[in-house]
Amino acid sequence: MQAPELVERMLRGDRRAVARTISLVENAAPQLREIMAGLAPHTGRARIVGLTGSPGVGKSTSTNALVKALRARDESVAVLAVDPSSPFSGGALLGDRVRMQEHATDGGVFIRSMASRGHLGGLSWATPHALRVLDAAGFGVILVETVGVGQAEVDIARHADTTVVLCAPGMGDSVQAAKAGVLEIADIFVVNKADREGARVTARELRQMVGQVEHGPGEWKPPIVSTVAAKGEGIDELLGRLDEHHAHLTATGEADRRRFARAREEIEAIVMSTLRARLGDVHGHAALDKLADAVATGHGDPYSAADTLLAALDT
Amino acid sequence: MQAPELVERMLRGDRRAVARTISLVENAAPQLREIMAGLAPHTGRARIVGLTGSPGVGKSTSTNALVKALRARDESVAVLAVDPSSPFSGGALLGDRVRMQEHATDGGVFIRSMASRGHLGGLSWATPHALRVLDAAGFGVILVETVGVGQAEVDIARHADTTVVLCAPGMGDSVQAAKAGVLEIADIFVVNKADREGARVTARELRQMVGQVEHGPGEWKPPIVSTVAAKGEGIDELLGRLDEHHAHLTATGEADRRRFARAREEIEAIVMSTLRARLGDVHGHAALDKLADAVATGHGDPYSAADTLLAALDT
């Protein structure tokens, strides 16, 4: 399928065209350039909600419960599961297929995993590109689920309008999570598996954490929602909080600011990828390999090596 | 202190000079260029051991126990705690000071936290630089401790000779961790808190996981070590496994290959940082902001915007 046809089908909401385009994103296909130009006027409408938390807190279950609740309101939903830790294998894909079956007959749901194979920023535009595709395809809500704490969490906050950080009782991570910087990125905290021992303690710790940060009048203060996602408990409250945060973003102009910041990063990432590719074109692999060998054996330093590569780019 | 003096002091093992240089790394100081050139001939001797795992598995405790055990063998040890998830606050520094006290009078131990503030690869050279400094300063073993699963784990494997992945029983993460790609990066698995319920199950699950991967003759098969780091139990066995892996790396030439790959990435990261800085010099912020605004409002696509920026770089 050629790019114009793909774009046209996507704008009609054809899910196969959407899936195909996200594969193009994963493979960094050259057609993306034309596709993105075609999609641009149709973007900027979807609500992007990020879900993150340590392995085992119940991210997939919570995402599924949210999908059901959103479908009950007749909103179209796309789920993008990003696995930034798996440059090696498409490990998330099995879970994908299992989850797909549940909604296989529902045209209002689209579920897709995406492995981000790059590092050093090499594929840092992949997630924003995929979100751009799903947005233009007309999904009202996009749930972005990510694996793991750490950089992945900070990244999701950069891509999402609303970031939901999930915790679970007894995982010893609520307080440590604060250290790991999630306090700065969470718009909503969820204590999932709230029927387990220690759930109240976890919720209290989170409340104290949030309480330690000063929130001015009119500023958003992250609420703490208790859920048992596997039973659907607390999901309506979570949805209510998501709506409140969305209204807050819109009212304060923060939604536009976040959209602007995302566009800025997306452009920068493309610029850097392009420069990286040019560098490869100029040098091939041999020059870098030779320099790396010198640095590895103590016969050179990385800055001088970088200078050599850059000098060739300038000529 | 000028760069030549810093280098000279560092090579004598002056710990204040080492601390100062790592601060220069954190701040991306221009002197690094000269310092790295001075250190280059003295690098390539340290054993770099990465420790990673979810929050709460006992990474700090395990690191401390390893430090003690290594000191008992009279090896000099540096600990670098990298917190890739905290671009916002120096949250790890408090823990740092607490830990420092334990070894304050021991000249053979150096402990330092480092926040990595960059994203999009902006400071991706920070960890390799810090390792380069500690290596040149003559530390025999460098323990790199990182926070969180996800990209941080994959990253540490790129920097370390040996990567230790810690798990703890009952955290529901051993199997999910496999999904998250740790199987590919772990050289040694540790089940810490092995006196807790479920420790055997966790160890067995890990063994099964490892068993599912085919290991050819002469290939390293990640062992699973049970520890109670808080009591020092199992640490000697862990140390033994670390020695075995080190011997394996040396015998197979893999140590050199890993050193080469690291140098390669370090050079690339410096090249990309330099190009990013040049882009900023050419445009200031205004041009990118204007383009980002157009993209955010659907009046342009990110590729055309990137083209505009790159065109100015070429002239």
Image: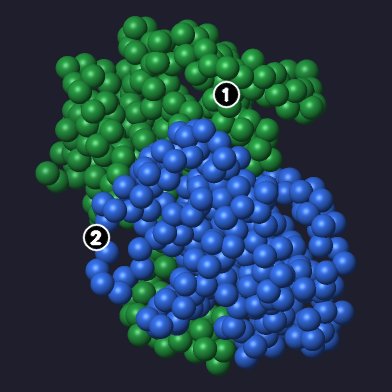
Chain colours: A blue, B green
Residue A139 x, y percent position in the rendering: 69, 77
Of residues B221 and B247, the one drawn nearer to the viewer in this rendering: B221
Count residues near mark 1 (Cα–Cα under 10 Å), then give few for <14, some for 14-19, many for 20+: many
Q: Residue at x 57, y 75 (%)?
A: A47
Circle 1 or circle 2, nearest the eye: 2
Left or right of residue B280: residue B252: right
Residue that numbered label 1 is attached to: B169
Classify mark 2: helix, strand or loop.
Answer: loop
Q: Amino acid at mark 1?
A: Pro
Count residues near mark 2 (Cα–Cα under 10 Å), then give few for <14, some for 14-19, many for 20+: few
Q: Chain of mark 1?
A: B
Q: Amino acid at mark 2?
A: Glu
Residue A233 x, y percent position in the rendering: 61, 52
Classify mark 1: helix, strand or loop.
Answer: loop
Residue that numbered label 2 is attached to: A214
Residue B39 visible (yes or no): no
Q: Residue at x 44, y 62 (%)?
A: A187
